[in-house]
Image (spheres, grey):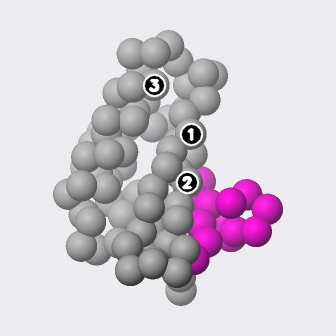
Amino acid sequence: MYRSGQRRSSRQFIVFFRANGTPGSRFGMSVKKALGGAVVRNRIRRRIREILRRNASEIASGWDMVIHPRSSVARAKFAPLAAELVGLLKSVGN
């Protein structure tokens, strides 16, 4: 993914992606220990999963994506965080 794919970034996320040749998209996330303890990292993962669940119809199909949150994600409000991630994921494939 990291070598053969492409990359997009924003203030709070980095997204690595490449085409997967299937009708659906697949998502992964990598939350570094530097972002906080287990409770903080799990909260970040839950927030990202909820954003993906709520906006599944708006995200491009046919891609494998790995999401890397930056440290500011732990303190960000949910609505602006969701808007930023969805906007970033919509740009995949363009």
Report the disc number at residue 41. 3
Residue beneath disc 1: 30
In percent of the image, x 25 and y 63: which residue is there? Answer: 55
**Dot 2 crowding, Cα within 10 Å, few <14, some 14–19, many 20+:** some
In percent of the image, x 35 and y 27: which residue is there? Answer: 43
Give the residue at the far left of this rendering.
Answer: 54
Q: Earlier in the sequence, mark 1 or mark 2?
A: 1
Residue beneath disc 2: 66
Q: What stretch of residues is rendered in magenta?
A: 1-19
Compute the Cα span from label 1 to label 2. Answer: 7 Å
- The answer to whether residue 2 is magenta is yes
In percent of the image, x 57 and y 77: which residue is there? Answer: 19
Name the amino acid, label 1: Ser
| Dot 1 and dot 2 residues touching (CB under 8 Å) | yes
Q: How many marks?
A: 3
Residue 31 x %, y %: 54, 34
Is 28 or 77 nearer to us in this picture? 28
The answer to whether 87 appears left or right of 69 in the picture is: left
Question: Which label sits in the foreground, 2 or 3?
Answer: 2
Residue 33 x %, y %: 60, 22
Compared to 9, does 58 lie above or below? below
Residue 26 x %, y %: 44, 61
Compute the Cα span from label 2 to label 3. Answer: 16 Å
Compute the Cα span from label 1 to label 3. Answer: 10 Å
SS type, badge 1: loop
Name the amino acid, label 3: Arg
SS type, badge 3: helix
SS type, badge 2: strand
Name the amino acid, label 2: Val
The answer to whether 19 appears left or right of 40 in the picture is: right
**Dot 3 crowding, Cα within 10 Å, few <14, some 14–19, many 20+:** some
